[in-house]
Image (cartoon, helix red, strand yellow):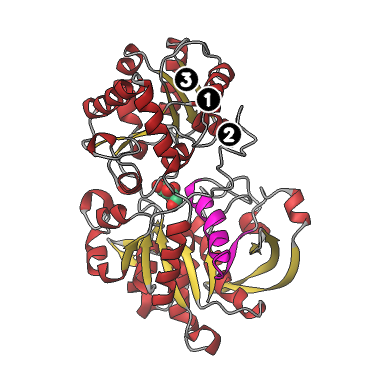
Amino acid sequence: MKILYATSEARPFAASGGLADVAGSLPKALKSRRIACRVVMPLYAGISEEIRNRMKYITNFDVPVAWRNQYCGLFSINMDNVIYYFIDNEYYFKRDSLYGYYDDAERFSFFSRAVIEMIRHTNWTPDVIHCNDWQTALTPVFLNCFYRHEEIFSNIKTVFTVHNLQYQGQYGYAVLDEVVGINRENHNILDYNLCVNFVKGAMQCCDMITTVSPTYAKEICTPWFSHSLDRFLLDNQYKLAGILNGIDYQEYNPAKDKDIAVNFTSEDFSGKSECKKALLKDFGLDSNAGAPVVGIVSRLVSHKGIDLVRSAFDQIIAEGFKVIILGTGDSEYEHFFADMALRYPFSVAATIGFIPAAAKKIYAGADIFLMPSKSEPCGLAQMISLRYGTIPVVRETGGLADSVFDCSKGQGNGLTFQSYTPEEMMNALHRAKAIYNDKENWKKLVRYAMECDYSWNTSATEYIKMYKSL
Ligand code: GLC
């Protein structure tokens, strides 16, 4: 079975969010289970010189973008036993950021079509093309509109994974003739709610729609979570499934991690208190106090539940928690946390930035990890914090509801709450603090959290089952 995994980002090459983690670890997990999985992504300017020097040039060819043809170079690299292909076009990808440009529709229309065209040049025809989010959403559309009559393309199946339904690739009708270039009789594929919608097109044309947790798969069929696609998803529920993401257990391993002060395991996690001391010191807080430390590593945007944290913040501090925040996002939240660090210099530290090594120090050194998301397709941070024995306090939504279970309702690995209110969040934090103060119970909880398995073990097997069912 051959899978071509098409993505706009993948670690360690280019990353802006959780998709890069998944694209950097699922293919490896599939490969180690004897599924031939290769990855294709754009060759961005930000990819390091060191990695570029290891790439092999394969060929170049033309890719149609509506009425014109554009140059496309093809490179590859073998990393951790997985082959990664890179689509090169400096006009589209030699830019400072991955996304956020006026011509994103054109850039990723080009990429989505290059994913198909490259198959003519690789001597390797996949059984399945697995697309992810709006950036590769046009691949299943192009495949059906332009390529099915050719033998090599006639049997390829397509899977489309939604990592976050908020981003749908919505544009005005002008892109149909200028960028996408499909025939008039096919325009209805992309037409939705009076605009062009790439994600709706992918979901219509693909063989299977997946999303990144079973709960989110149910949630997106309801108006509150669907960003207006619930009716369409209900009609297509027969081909919709939720498969929980895993995390890379080699990358996130407290026993071997070089970014943390002291390594530790679930059998002996005495090193964790050293990590806490080092964390407090690194972030300029008093490292001798016994107060519970709440860590937040997040994009600072509304759907992450930052409003709840903001409205309960004074109370959190008044009740004796210390808070360490790492993240970037909307400026109002960035300013808020920077202000709080000034207002409470002994209890709060905020770093506005995206620094993977600092994130690991928080995962390892905090006692509690707070993730009160309004919606969360899967969420990886709660799984990483579990692995490092930091107890998650989360709202029961999406992947959070599928990975964190409240310890007051039987065997659990964290604390959860349902309603999106500061009171409910505080209630969960209180319950966490009560257990924290009972040292023996807390140790049991930490050990159990560390022993939960959120590697790709189960999920990679589910993906394989799904591919085989197509
Ligand atoms: C998106 C989602 C996040 C998910 C990640 C990987 O970033 O917001 O919940 O974990 O994709 O699938």
Dot 1 crowding, Cα within 10 Å, few <14, some 14–19, many 20+: some
Asked if residue 372 can be seen in this view, the reply is yes
Do the residues under discs 2 and 1 have CB atoms within 8 angstroms? yes
* Quarter occupied by residue 211: bottom left
> Which one is in front, 207 or 46?
207
Residue highlighted by disc 3: 338
Magenta residues, as a range?
Answer: 17-42
Asked whether the beta carbons under mark 2 and mark 3 sit within 8 Å of each other, the answer is no
- Residue 75 vs residue 146, the one in the foreground: 75
Q: In the image, which disc is placed on residue 430?
A: none
Q: In whole angstroms, how far apart are the C-alphas of marks 1 and 3?
A: 8 Å
Label 3 crowd bin: few (<14), some (14–19), many (20+), radius 10 Å: some
Kind of residue at badge 3: Ala
Question: Label 1 is placed on what type of residue?
Answer: Thr
Q: Determine if the magenta segment contains residue 444.
A: no
User: Is residue 19 left or right of 378 when viewed as pictured?
Assistant: right
Residue located beneath label 1 in the image: 351
Q: Residue at x 24, y 25 (%)?
A: 427
Which corner quadrant of the image does residue 110 belong to?
A: bottom right
| Mark 3: secondary structure | helix
Q: What amino acid is labelled 2 in the image?
A: Ile
Question: How far from the left and from the top, in percent, is residue 371?
Answer: 37, 35
Q: Nearer the viewer, residue 269 or 397?
A: 269
Q: Residue at x 54, y 60 (%)?
A: 29
Residue drawn at (45%, 39%), measured in percent from left and top?
450
Q: Which mark is residue 355?
A: 2
Q: Image quadrant for the C terminus? A: bottom left
